[in-house]
Amino acid sequence: MNDRAPLSPPDDAPPVPDSTSLGARMLNVFATPADVFDEVKVSPPRTAHWLVPTLLATLVGWVGVWLVLHQESIKQQISDLQEAQLEKSIEQGRMTREQLEAQRPTIEKIGRIIRNATMFAAPPLMAFGLVFWWALITFLVGRYALGGHFTYMKAVEVSGLIGMLATLESVIKTLMMVALGSLYAGANLATLLVKDFDPANLSHGLMAAVDVVAFWVLAVRAIGLSRLSGATFAKSAAWLFGLWLLWTGLWIVAGHFLPKLFGG
């Protein structure tokens, strides 16, 4: 007989997480994201990790946009914003009121076309764009700033699964917009403290940026970056929150000053 004892892994081999189904990972990312990302990191590449959550986000986005754009109060807000822009054109001498009234049917027709195109195109563009954009940030920071060793597509898988949280964020925002009848409603300070939100108001923009759900999603992204790169959560969070602060600050400042620079 030539019996041999079964080979056992060496004592210093890294533990391999138990494999779970895609559905379990999509749900567990809400409660135990670190475990999900550990499993994704050592598992073979799997397109479904990012594709299925992104398709779900697209579907939810279509429903959300349809609900929002069929609210009379929100349609009135959009109409008021468009009318304000047209009035500015008159004040700045770009057209006369007679020209505006003559062109109004064409303007309204173009507006309906743009609105319908937005309802169809915006959700998939946002869903897929955010997955690959955040994956790029995770890859660049994780590889070149934190010294990790992982592929871009692994970052895409992690970013796609985190898209489940972003989908929940979208659902919360949509429900608040519908309930409050406001384009600017969300889980932020502006919704609590500002009655008539003005996107060009600097303080309103700053308060809108303080969004509890967005911070939660950003923290989970930092966990994903930490698990992929091997860096601490503190370093990962410092990088992502720092980049978010920079981008958000530039966006708010631009929204405040650009209209003034161009005569708005």
Image: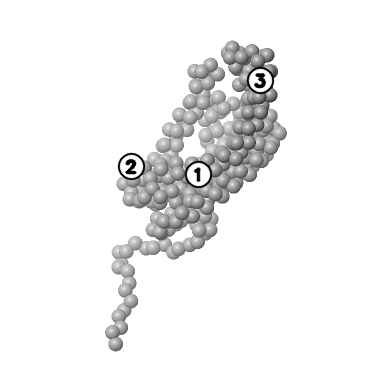
Residues at marks 1 and 2, CA–CA distance in whole angstroms: 25 Å
Is 190 on the left or on the right of 15, as rendered?
right
Element type at marker 1? Answer: helix
Q: What residue type is labelled 1?
A: Phe
- Quick one: which residue is furthest to the bottom in this view? 1
Mark 1 vs mark 2: give the one in front: 1
Number of other residues with Cα within 10 Å of mark 1, as a class: few under 14, some 14 to 19, many 20 or more: some
Q: Earlier in the sequence, mark 1 or mark 2?
A: 1
Q: In this view, does 250 lie to the left or right of 114?
A: left
In whole angstroms, how far apart are the C-alphas of marks 2 and 3? 54 Å
Where is the N terminus found, in terms of image quarters? bottom left
Do the residues bearing badges 2 and 3 touch, measured as CB atoms within 8 Å?
A: no
Mark 2 packing: few (<14 Cα in 10 Å), some, or many (20+)? some
User: Visible in this render: residue 172?
Assistant: no
Relative to 96, is 41 above or below? below
Q: Nearer the viewer, residue 85 or 185?
A: 85
Q: Mark 1 points at which residue?
A: 128
| Three-letter code, disc 3 | Gln
Q: What element carries label 2?
A: helix
Residue at image coords 39%, 63%:
16
Q: Is residue 86 above or below residue 31?
A: above
Numbered disc 3: secondary structure: helix
N-term mark: 3 or 1: 3
Residue under the image location 52 percent in, 55 percent down: 26
Q: Which residue is drawn at 32% across and 72% down?
A: 8
The CA span between labels 3 and 1 is: 37 Å
Give the residue pinned by disc 3.
Answer: 103
- Residue kind at label 2, given as amino acid type: Ala
Residue farthest to the right, as pictured:
72
Report which residue position mark 2 lands on: 145
Q: In this view, does 63 lie to the left or right of 158?
A: right
> Of the residues under marks 2 and 3, which one precedes in the sequence?
3
